[in-house]
Image: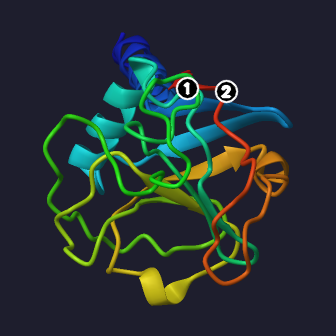
């Protein structure tokens, strides 16, 4: 009898763990393919909550990758000026806007900024992250504990690699690629 109870508890725990893991996975659709992202709510709970809220409400759909630097990162998420389907779309202002929600306090952690990591973009003020984020093409240790990393690409990094690169110095992109959709899995 004890073995049956133990097996039931173990089975329930495994199912619950799988369910929680799926709850923190996102699907990013790009013109080149589908990308799966795992979020880390235990490391950056407020950034994960904001990211999911904006994604699941469709705010990231049609938002451009306005700053893309080869060998470094691709930045997107300006829901104010970066949405190509919005009347306020302005490529020259993309990267200066955010959402209508308040800025987030920094949630620095031990997550290293390695290839595929998602991190919150911000101004010089560590507590200024809002809606913008970037995905690292390569390891960028100078960002560790300076930016709030909150997730990582777990499938489809080859499609992130195909995002159109910008100017080698500024990263600004003419005719940029965009997020087709971004939702919880």
Q: Which residue is at 58% across, 30% downward?
A: 84
Q: Measuring from the top left, give residue 184's x and y in whole percent.
A: 49, 23
Give the secondary structure at mark 1: loop
Q: Of residues 169 and 144, which is closer to you in this image? A: 169
Dots 1, 2 in contact, CB < 8 A: yes
Give the secondary structure at mark 2: loop
Residue 64 vs 145, above or below: the answer is: above
Would you name the residue on which mark 1 appears?
Answer: 61
Q: Of residues 112 and 165, which is closer to you in this image? A: 165
Q: Residues within 10 Å of mark 2 (few under 14, many from 20)?
A: some
Q: Measuring from the top left, give residue 30's x and y in whole percent.
A: 74, 34
Which quadrant of the figure has residue 172? bottom right
Query: In the rendered view of the protein, which quadrant contains the N terminus?
Result: top left
Colour mode of the rendering: rainbow
Q: Of residues 71 and 6, which is closer to you in this image? A: 71
Q: Measuring from the top left, give residue 81's x and y in whole percent.
A: 43, 41
Residue 182 as seen in the image, left or right of residue 101? right
Residue 182 as seen in the image, left or right of residue 143? right
Give the mark, 1 or 2, whose residue is nearer the N terminus: 1
Residue 86 as seen in the image, left or right of residue 74? left
Alpha-carbon span between mark 1 and mark 2: 5 Å
Q: Which residue is at 73% across, 80% downward?
A: 168
């Amino acid at each position: 009898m004890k073995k049956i109870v133990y097996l039931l508890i173990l089975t329930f725990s495994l199912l619950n763990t799988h369910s929680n893991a799926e709850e923190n996975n996102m699907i990013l659709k790009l013109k080149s393919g589908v990308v799966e992202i795992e979020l880390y709510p235990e490391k950056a709970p407020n950034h994960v909550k904001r990211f999911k809220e904006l994604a699941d409400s469709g705010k990231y759909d049609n938002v451009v990758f306005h700053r893309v630097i080869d060998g470094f990162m691709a930045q997107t998420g300006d829901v104010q000026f970066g949405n190509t389907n919005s009347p306020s779309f302005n490529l020259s202002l993309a990267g200066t806007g955010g959402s209508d929600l308040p800025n987030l306090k920094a949630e620095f952690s031990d997550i290293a900024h390695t290839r595929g990591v998602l991190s919150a973009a911000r101004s010089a003020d560590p507590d200024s992250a809002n809606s913008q984020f970037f995905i690292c093409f390569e390891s960028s240790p100078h960002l560790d504990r300076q930016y709030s990393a909150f997730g990582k690409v777990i499938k489809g990094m080859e499609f992130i690699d195909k995002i159109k690169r910008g100017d080698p110095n500024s990263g600004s992109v003419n005719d940029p690629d965009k997020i087709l959709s971004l939702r919880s899995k």
